[in-house]
Image (spheres, rainbow, N blue to C red):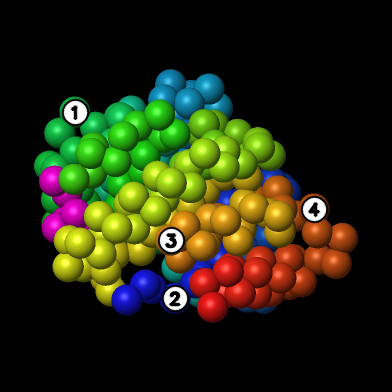
Amino acid sequence: MTRPIQIAPSVLPADFSKLGQEVADLEAAGVDLIQWDVMDGQFVPNLTFGPDIIKSARQHCNVPFEAHMMVYTPDVMAKQYIDAGCSRLIVHAEACTHLHRTLANIKELGANAAVALNPATPVSAIEHVLDLVDLVLVMTVNPGFGGQAYISTMEPKIAQVRKMINDSGRGDEIELEVDGGISPTTIAGAAAAGANILIAGSALYRDPEGLEHAVSDLRARAQAAIA
Ligand code: DX5
């Protein structure tokens, strides 16, 4: 069984001078959760949200927060982001020398543990942690910035991960998330390939009919693709 479709924003395109209002607006627009793209300026050439920023936004909405940790030291930072209000941490397989231990530590801290794969990273990297994770994130851009083009050649990889998840026996527990270039023209391919959580940043904020329309339109397109 595949988990239900969820639409989640990246807040990268939001107005950082009023993040409390921005997350309240996203909740009102009907998002299922909010993803914070945490970047350390080393793993990716960009620097974004510290835990205190997320903590201050936490009080302005009730939807779950997840931190997409595009950082080289997730073990050092994990507790701070969980204490800031993130109920799921997504670490990059490429950044973790001891990925199994990192994921186990996140679970011991009381959060959901998830793993992300950059476009060039083979799915074999997650083969031995599917008993630990609650989500696998397949990147459809090279991480670091919003507004990039969707890499459609990742769709067979999404399907591969979906099969691995289902073959693991945890198909009704593990979410398959896709992040990068998700838009009205690309979301159907990602959903049809097996993704059930779709992260959108620029496509949400550039919809001329507003956030609520953007969220419902993306959800409808994803659901139609798997009907
Ligand atoms: C890349 C970021 C982006 C962001 C989504 O590091 O993770 O993928 O979340 O941005 P868009 O939807 O504009 O590609």
- Name the element at disc 3: loop
Q: CA distance from mark 4 to mark 3?
A: 26 Å
Looking at the rendered structure, the kind of residue marked 2 is Pro
Whichever of callouts 1 and 4 sits on the residue coming sooner in the sequence is 1
- Tell us which disc is closer to us: 3 or 2: 3
190 relative to 120, above or below: below
Q: Tell me the magenta residue range.
A: 128-133
The label on residue 4 is 2
Secondary structure of the residue carrying tag 4 is: loop
Q: Which of the two labelled residues, at mark 1 and mark 3, occupies the earlier sequence position? A: 1
**Residue at mark 4:** 206
Q: What x and y, as percent, mark residue 118?
A: 41, 35
On-image quarter of the N terminus: bottom left
Residue at x 23% of width, y 44% of height: 126
Q: In the depicted view, which residue is nearer to us: 160 or 45? A: 160
Q: Is residue 82 visible?
A: no
The verdict on label 2 being within 8 Å of ligand 1 is no
Q: Earlier in the sequence, mark 3 or mark 2?
A: 2
| Mark with earlier residue (2, 4) | 2
Query: Element at badge 2?
Result: loop
